[in-house]
Image (spheres, rainbow, N blue to C red):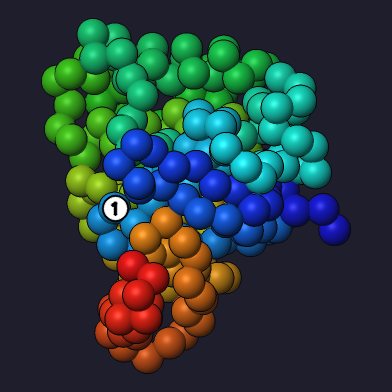
């Protein structure tokens, strides 16, 4: 079966020498892939390349088997993403932000989609408040809600639990598991290994812009195993 989202031999470097190097990665339908690495490992850069926000200098990205550069708008509408910061207009209410996001993605029943996602992420009481007046955690919930309200087939989330309280983390976890069961392909980055291990089918370790291996989600003392993998890669002169 064709992968929902894949990257083949992709590299993208910056003037300071940082970047991503010869990356191969596939996310299949119904699969949750977790991308883990230390700060500066290249996770956000890889996600931006996979979403077309940055162009690879070599290699390519495929969305449903179609080269990203030629993917039609209708196919792009099946993607939901949150990378680095929630995209929201601070002077508009949470509801209005969700409405604009839904219309941009061609959602047929805008009100229904908004009502469902407000309930899904317990945002009802904040729906008519301006985003600038919300706590960081609730702004993050709005960003996640905007990324997911159109029921995307491909989901890319960069550190989505940032600033979320425990209840918000649990709601997000349940939402992602439910969407994967429905066939969505999900790529999520996180510093919280114990959390992603609860939901991931595969955990991919990134270091110094390269993918250096996988961790099984049921690995005992998974954080220790992660740091050992990074340390071994650094000592091998790859970091």
Q: Is residue 94 visible?
A: yes
Name the spot of residue 159 as percent of width and height, x first: 34, 49
Q: Is residue 181 visible?
A: no
Q: Residue furthest right?
A: 1
The part of the image, by quadrant, that contains residue 144 is top left
| Residue at the image position 21 percent from the left and 40 percent from the top | 137
The part of the image, by quadrant, that contains residue 227 is bottom left
Name the spot of residue 185 as percent of width and height, x first: 64, 51
Would you say 14 lies left or right of 150 here?
Answer: left
Q: Residue furthest top?
A: 91
| Residue at the image position 56 percent from the left and 23 percent from the top | 112
Q: Nearer the viewer, residue 81 or 19?
A: 19
Vertically, is 41 above or below 64?
A: below
Q: Residue furthest bottom?
A: 220
Image quarter where the C terminus lies is bottom left
Name the spot of residue 25 as percent of width and height, x first: 62, 58
| Residue at the image position 33 percent from the left and 20 percent from the top | 88
Would you say 94 lies left or right of 13 here?
Answer: left
> Label 1: which residue?
40
Q: Nearer the viewer, residue 138 or 195?
A: 195
């Amino acid at each position: 079966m064709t992968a929902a989202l894949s990257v083949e031999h992709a590299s993208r470097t910056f003037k300071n020498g940082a970047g991503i190097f010869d990356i191969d990665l596939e996310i299949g339908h119904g699969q949750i892939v977790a991308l883990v690495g230390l700060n500066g490992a290249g996770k956000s850069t890889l996600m931006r390349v996979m979403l077309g926000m940055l162009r690879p200098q070599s290699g390519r990205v495929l969305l449903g088997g179609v080269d990203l550069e030629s993917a039609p708008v209708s196919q792009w509408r099946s993607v939901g993403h949150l990378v680095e910061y929630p995209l929201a207009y601070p002077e508009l209410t949470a509801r209005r932000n969700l409405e604009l996001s839904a219309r941009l993605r061609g959602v047929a029943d805008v009100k229904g989609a908004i009502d469902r996602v407000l309930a899904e992420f317990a945002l009802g009481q904040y729906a008519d408040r301006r985003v600038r007046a919300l706590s960081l955690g609730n702004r993050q919930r709005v960003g996640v809600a905007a990324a997911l309200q159109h029921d995307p087939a491909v989901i890319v989330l960069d550190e989505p639990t940032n600033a979320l309280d425990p209840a918000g983390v649990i709601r997000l976890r349940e939402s992602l598991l439910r969407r994967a069961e429905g066939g969505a392909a999900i790529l999520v980055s996180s510093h919280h290994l114990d959390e992603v291990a609860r939901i991931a089918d595969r955990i991919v370790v990134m270091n110094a812009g390269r993918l250096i291996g996988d961790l099984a989600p049921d690995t005992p003392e998974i954080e220790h195993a992660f740091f050992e993998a990074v340390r071994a890669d650094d000592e091998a002169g790859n970091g």
